[in-house]
Image (spheres, rainbow, N blue to C red):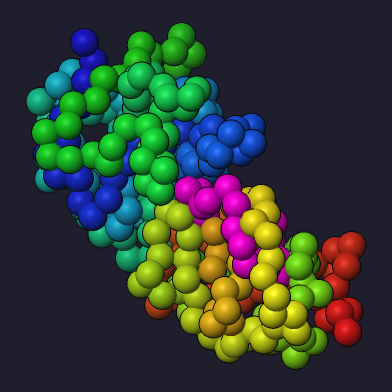
Amino acid sequence: MRTIEVVDPGALATVQDLGRPGLASLGVGVSGAADTRSLRLANRLVGNGEGLAAVEVTFGGLTIRARTDLLVAVTGAPCPILLDGAPQGLNAPIALPADTELRLLAPPVGLRSYVAFRGGIDIEPVLGSRSCDVMADLGPPPLAVGTVLPVGAPPLRFPAVDVAPVPAPSADDIVLRIVPGPRSEWFTTEALDLLTTSAFVVTSESNRVGMRLDGPELVRRRTEELPSEGMVSGALQVPPAGRPTLFLADHPVTGGYPVVGVVVTDDIPAAAQARPGQCLRFRVPADSPSQLGDSS
């Protein structure tokens, strides 16, 4: 059997694929990789289908031991990669012989790295996905010392790419495009202006569920209670304190606070690489159907 053993999971390492879409009506969130772009790339580099399960690593620290010969690729946050102490390349296939150890150090920028194995992580799916949902406690638990993961049979197609020229995550302020609403009218015009002209700092109270942001208070014009509504990844929900929370992969399926805007899908991978202390800035695209500042 093709397997890997976890020697050290680091701060947090989980199995992730593209999640469980279509089950929100049953109270089940999508989950899946926080940075789907990096997951898809890692799978392509080893010849897998884009949605196969891989390991999502938060801020490096993962060490695994191959029990059989494997082909792997590491993408996302550019952590230094060591194979039995020898440096390896990011965004490229890496031959991992049996009884060798692959170690990921802390990345200088970005937050989440992805380790894909040719054949994919072949654990039993739960509700159609192998993803670990840390909020719902659904799917496989986070990796721990001694965890053994089976790797599936390699696909027939062999990877044809030596290296993918992918830019590293930004160490500067990250600009995210947002679509206004669905509850932007609950906020004052001044609050809406602040949202698109101010920097919001990612706090340490952040994880796969979402990022709590610190910055200017977004004052509401309406203060009554709002019935719970469906949530999506990228939603900017604003609790009574006026500081927004940006929801990520393991977000709840409903929420009782107004959502002032939603980050466009293509920008969510960049948001998923933001580290505590980094600043986010929000912009409304010129071709957006409505503008935040139009509320009165």
Total tally of numbered discs in the picture:
0
Decide which of 64, 198 is in the foreground and name it. 198
Residue in the picture at 33% in, 65% down: 108
Relative to residue 233, is residue 74 drawn left or right?
left
Query: Which segment is the magenta one?
Result: 248-266
Give coordinates of residue 88: x percent, y percent.
Answer: 26, 43
Magenta span includes 163: no
Residue at x-position 49% and y-position 41%: 31
Left or right placement of residue 239 versus residue 212 in this view: right
The residue that appears at 45% across and 55% down in the rendered structure is: 209
Quarter of the C terminus within the rendering: bottom right
Q: Position of residue 113 (x, y in %)?
A: 37, 49
Q: Residue at x 59, y 87 (%)?
A: 217
Answer yes or no: is residue 191 visible: yes
The percent coordinates of residue 93 (x first, y second) are: 37, 32
The quarter of the picture where the N terminus appears is top left
Q: Where is residue 207? Give x, y as percent.
A: 39, 59
Dividing the picture into quarters, in which one does residue 22 lie? Answer: top right
| Horizontal side, residue 21 vs residue 135: left or right | right
For the question of whether residue 83 can be seen, the reply is no
197, above or below 33, in the image: below
Quarter of image, res 133? top left
Q: Is residue 72 above or below residue 86?
A: above
| Viewer-side residue, 91 vs 14 | 14
